[in-house]
Image: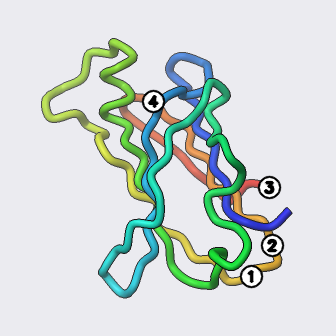
Amino acid sequence: MTGLTTHVLDTALGKPAEGLRIQLMRMNGEEAELITTVFTNADGRVDGGPLLQGENFQIGQYELLFHAGDYLKAQGIALTEPPFLDVIPIRFGISDVTAHYHVPLLLSPYGYSTYRGS
């Protein structure tokens, strides 16, 4: 499979992060163009296949914006105001359109991690 996928796990609650809003941006220098806005499903994944695929899956710089603050508030987690983590930006490059890029997010109210998955 080629394309771009993501997956969000809530490490504080020990489950997939359902209902988390994600925006995918294509970067043109420091300018960001919105490609799509999606929400995670019950498995913490996005319905409908890859976020980018086919002719839309192009070499370039991209950014995923994970709206963690809204998600954490919806879970009933008491957060500071403003929350320590609100919108988490992950900027990355796609250099091979024949490959699969998976950008997962492991999330808690006070920390997160990501990596290039498979």
Q: Most extreme residue toward the left, as rendered?
A: 81
Mark 4 vs mark 1: in front: 1
Can you say which quadrant of the picture contains the C terminus? Answer: bottom right
**Residue 100 position in % (x across, y down):** 78, 65
Q: Helix, strand, or loop for circle 3?
A: loop
**Residue 2 position in % (x across, y down):** 80, 67
The Cα–Cα distance between marks 4 and 3, rounded to whole angstroms, is 22 Å
The Cα–Cα distance between marks 2 and 1, rounded to whole angstroms, is 6 Å
Residue to which mark 4 is pinned = 108
Mark 2 vs mark 4: in front: 2
Q: Give the vertical position of 66 relative to 70 (above or below).
A: below
Nearer-N-terminus badge (4/3): 4
Q: Residues within 10 Å of mark 2 (few under 14, many from 20)?
A: some
Can you say which quadrant of the picture contains the N terminus? Answer: bottom right
What's the residue type where badge 1 is placed? Asp
Residue sitting nearer the eye, 91 or 111: 91
Q: Helix, strand, or loop for circle 1?
A: loop
The Cα–Cα distance between marks 3 and 2, rounded to whole angstroms, is 10 Å
Contact between labelled residues 1 and 2, with CB atoms less than 8 Å apart: yes
Residue 96, numbered circle: 1
Residue to which mark 2 is pinned = 99
Is residue 82 left or right of 12 when viewed as pictured?
Answer: left
**Residue 77 position in % (x across, y down):** 33, 15
Nearer-N-terminus badge (3/2): 2
Nearer-N-terminus badge (2/4): 2
Mark 4 vs mark 3: in front: 3
Q: Residues within 10 Å of mark 3 (few under 14, many from 20)?
A: few
Q: Residue at x 46, y 35 (%)?
A: 20
Residue to which mark 3 is pinned = 118
Q: Residue at x 57, y 51 (%)?
A: 114
Nearer-N-terminus badge (1/3): 1
Contact between labelled residues 1 and 4, with CB atoms less than 8 Å apart: no
